[in-house]
Every structure is written in structure tokens, then in C-alpha cells.
Image (tube, coloured by chain):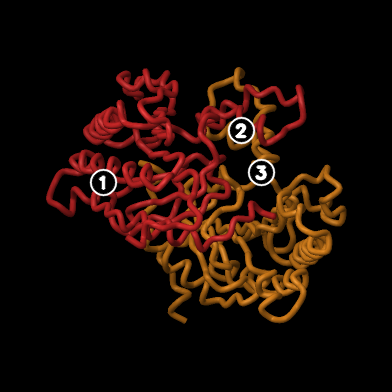
Chain colours: A red, B orange
């Protein structure tokens, strides 16, 4: 399988699994039925990433902005996120859920994973953004004591709510839209952004291989 | 000119004028000679944007990360930024330069524009990011008093260094790279991102028209 040989892999891949509602509509289902169809693709993608040696994977679950949608949809994506996280319990990796867990919109079932937990072989970090908000994340900076020392990247990055999530090298977004929609703004500063036109429930491994092949052709300068 | 009829225009366009050094190399010039070739494209782009009714335009000048490059390059892009800003003095619009102006790397010639100044007809806001850093920008949040009131978007956005720059609707990046490279992370949260493969010194108006035609086909959800 030539597509599985990579010269240079991203350490950390961000996944924006967009298009569940559009997929449902295209398939004659109510919009909220689309989220459930996103579970199995997530597991397949994880298995491939683990097998090729990706070190960290962050899934965009739902955001605080998303919770303004009709409640039938909100309940459906909350339930899908609970199932998604539970799929990874007892699978190899260390699991972390990041989001505003003081809010009633955060599924209580996921509270145990708001501290990183390791299962089996610790080779890959799996992060889920659940009831995540970029404002919520950055707002933790307001508690940062800027007078105590010089602002180094290290201190700064340790002061946001998502401090346990590292810099993202590659973001792959399904569903054709070319925007970040608030996905980890600090970690995504220098991330390369790859868009798959197909909708997330139509995930195929080739999407990931194409993104990784493209990533190999990108230079990494970090502004230098 | 059919390409100048748009149903829906972005209010605010961010411009990442990348590829000056690659253009210089391709044309047998030293890398640092490329920046000067980016001036005239900026003026042409401004004239088109003004004529079609764009309300705000932000140019990515240089970042604090960029200043780590060889000094001959650094001096060249600093000089190009001084010339670029001066091109807009006395042209219609209100002009603002945003960046860390306490640093010796900030060109002193541009200090007068670190407060917004209006020339002629005030129809378009023109922002330049000069010695800008996303960390520098967000770091102003550490001075934000989160205890005084609830965190509303309004207060939050007023507390970053670039508070006078509004939300970006469309980012156009020349030079083929698909990343934000630290461009206004807060204002770019929901920006649609369009990449032109040609290098910035090879700017043609069609690049802008293509981006605007593409932008019309995008939905605006802001996560809802």
C-alpha cells in the first residue's frame, strides 16, 4: 500500500468532522440523524492514525456556538459525543475531553474524561473538544499573571484552558468549508489546513492519505 | 464587467501577500528584492476594493516571528512596509497600523499611524499589521479584569491589542500556502479562507474576483 509510506508525518492532526446534517438531508433523514453516522468514521480514522504513528489526534465535537441550534439537534450531537468518547475507552491511547464542563450543556457522562486518562498502549493522545469555545479557552488568559515573568510561549500556552493540547500541525476539515470555526485558535496558528469536499459520514481512508501526501509537500517555517 | 457584480460582499477582507521571496528567486533576484514588488499590487487591490464597496481591508505586513529572518531581509520588508503605508496617506480611507510599537523592530516612521487617521473620503478602513504578533495581541487579555462583569464577546474583543480591527469575513492568501500563520486569530475565527497559488507580486484582479465569486457561494453560520 504505497499510500502508507510517508517521509514526514504531522505529529498532531486536528479533525473537523463537518457535514453530518447535510449528509442526513441528502439521505432523506432528519438533520439530527446525521451525527450518529459520524461515529464509525472516527474510529476508522483513529485506527489508521495509530497504525502509521500519529502522536496526537483532536476531534472537534461540538462548540458553545453550536448549542444555539434547535434542541433536537443539540441533544443528538451531545449523545453522539458521549458515544464517540466511550468508543475510545479501553482502546490504546490517552483520552482527554476539553470544554466548559461547568455548563449544563456539557454532558455529565464525560466529566470523568476532563482529566486525561490512559488506556492500554499510550502511543497516541486522543482529544475531544466538547462544549468547547474559543472564548472560553482564551479567557483563561485573563487569570494569567503577566507581571510575574516575561511572556514566553511556554508560559502563555500553559495559561489557556486547552493547555494540555499541543500545537496542531495539520487540520483536516470534511464537508468542503474552508474555515476554522473556532478550532483551537492558539494551537492552530501555523497549522496547515486541508479541506475534503465529501461529507464526514462519507469518510474514506483515501481522504486521510491524500491529506498526508499533501502535507509532505508543505514547508514548515513557523514564520522564519 | 460581469465579474464586478456581486450579490453578497464580505465587509472585511484580510490579505496575506505571501510569496515575495519565492518570486524574487524565480526571477533571478536576491530574496530581499521581492518585497518591493508587492507594493503596486497592494495599491491596485485597494483601488478595486474601494470601488466595489469593501468596508475594511487588513494587510499582513510582517510579524514578530518574521523578524528572525536574516537582517538583509528584515530591513527590506521593514522598508517595504513603510512605503506601503505611505502609499495610502492622502488616499481615501482611514489608516491604522497595528503591531508592537514599543519594540525597536517597529519602524519609527509608522508610529504616527498607530492611532487611526482618516484621509479624504472615509469609506474604507485600511489596516496594516506591522511587527504584529498573535501572542502580543492576545497577551493584552492578561490585563483584562474578568471579575468586573460577565465575559461578553464585546468586552472580550475590546481587550486584545487589535481591538480596533473588526471580524474578518474573507482571508485571501497568495503563494499557495494553506495556513493562517498567526493572522488575527480572534477576528479570523469564522473567516472563509481562499488560497491563490500565484505569488503576490504576480497579483491580478482576477484573483480577487475569483475569491469574491467563491465567497458568494459560502454560507455564513457562525456555528449556528
Q: Where is B54 relative to A173, above or below?
A: below
When the figure is inspected, residue A66 is found, relative to residue A111, above or below; the finding is below
Q: Chain of mark 3?
A: B
Question: Dividing the image into 4 quarters, which one contains the C terminus of chain A?
Answer: bottom right
Q: Is residue B57 left or right of residue A75?
A: right
Q: Could you tell me which chain the residue with mark 1 belongs to?
A: A
* SS at mark 1 in the image: helix
Residue A27 spot, x, y in % from top left: 14, 52
Q: What is the CA distance from the residue labelled 1 to the residue labelled 3?
A: 35 Å
Seen in the picture, residue B78 relative to A124 is either above or below; the reply is below
Q: CA distance from mark 2 to mark 3?
A: 19 Å
**Of A140 and A70, which appears nearest the observer?**
A140
In the image: residue A5, left or right of residue B80: left
Within 10 angstroms of label 1, few (less than 14), some, or many (20 or more) residues?
many
Q: Which mark is residue A20?
A: 1
Callout 2: 10 Å neighbours few (<14), some, many (20+)?
A: many
Instruction: Give the quadrant of residue B141.
Output: top right
Point 31% across, 31% down: residue = A91
Q: Residue at x 61, y 19 (%)?
A: B148
Q: Is residue A34 visible?
A: yes
Q: Which residue is mark 2?
A: A157
Mark nearer the N terminus (1 vs 2): 1
- Residue assigned mark 3: B162
Q: Residue at x 82, y 55 (%)?
A: B110
Q: In the drawing, does residue A155 fall left or right of residue A94?
A: right
Amino acid at each position: 500500500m504505497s499510500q502508507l509510506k510517508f517521509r514526514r508525518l504531522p505529529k498532531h492532526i486536528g479533525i473537523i468532522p463537518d457535514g453530518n446534517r447535510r449528509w442526513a438531508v441528502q439521505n432523506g433523514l432528519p438533520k439530527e440523524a446525521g451525527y450518529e453516522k459520524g461515529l464509525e468514521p472516527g474510529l476508522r480514522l483513529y485506527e489508521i492514525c495509530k497504525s502509521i504513528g500519529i502522536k496526537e489526534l483532536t476531534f472537534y465535537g461540538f462548540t458553545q456556538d453550536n448549542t444555539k441550534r434547535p434542541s433536537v439537534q443539540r441533544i443528538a450531537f451531545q449523545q453522539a459525543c458521549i458515544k464517540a468518547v466511550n468508543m475510545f475507552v479501553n482502546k490504546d491511547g490517552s483520552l482527554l475531553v476539553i470544554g466548559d464542563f461547568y455548563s449544563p450543556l456539557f454532558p455529565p457522562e464525560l466529566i470523568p474524561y476532563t482529566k486525561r486518562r490512559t488506556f492500554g498502549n499510550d502511543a497516541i493522545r486522543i482529544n475531544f473538544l466538547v462544549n468547547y469555545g474559543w472564548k472560553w479557552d482564551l479567557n483563561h488568559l485573563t487569570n494569567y499573571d503577566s507581571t510575574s515573568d516575561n511572556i514566553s510561549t511556554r508560559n502563555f500556552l500553559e495559561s489557556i484552558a486547552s493547555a494540555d493540547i499541543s500545537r496542531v500541525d495539520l487540520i483536516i476539515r470534511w464537508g468542503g468549508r474552508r474555515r476554522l470555526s473556532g478550532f483551537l485558535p492558539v494551537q492552530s496558528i501555523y497549522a496547515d489546513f486541508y479541506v475534503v469536499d465529501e461529507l464526514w459520514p462519507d469518510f474514506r481512508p483515501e481522504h486521510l492519505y491524500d491529506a498526508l501526501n499533501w502535507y509532505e509537500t508543505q514547508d514548515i517555517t513557523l514564520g522564519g
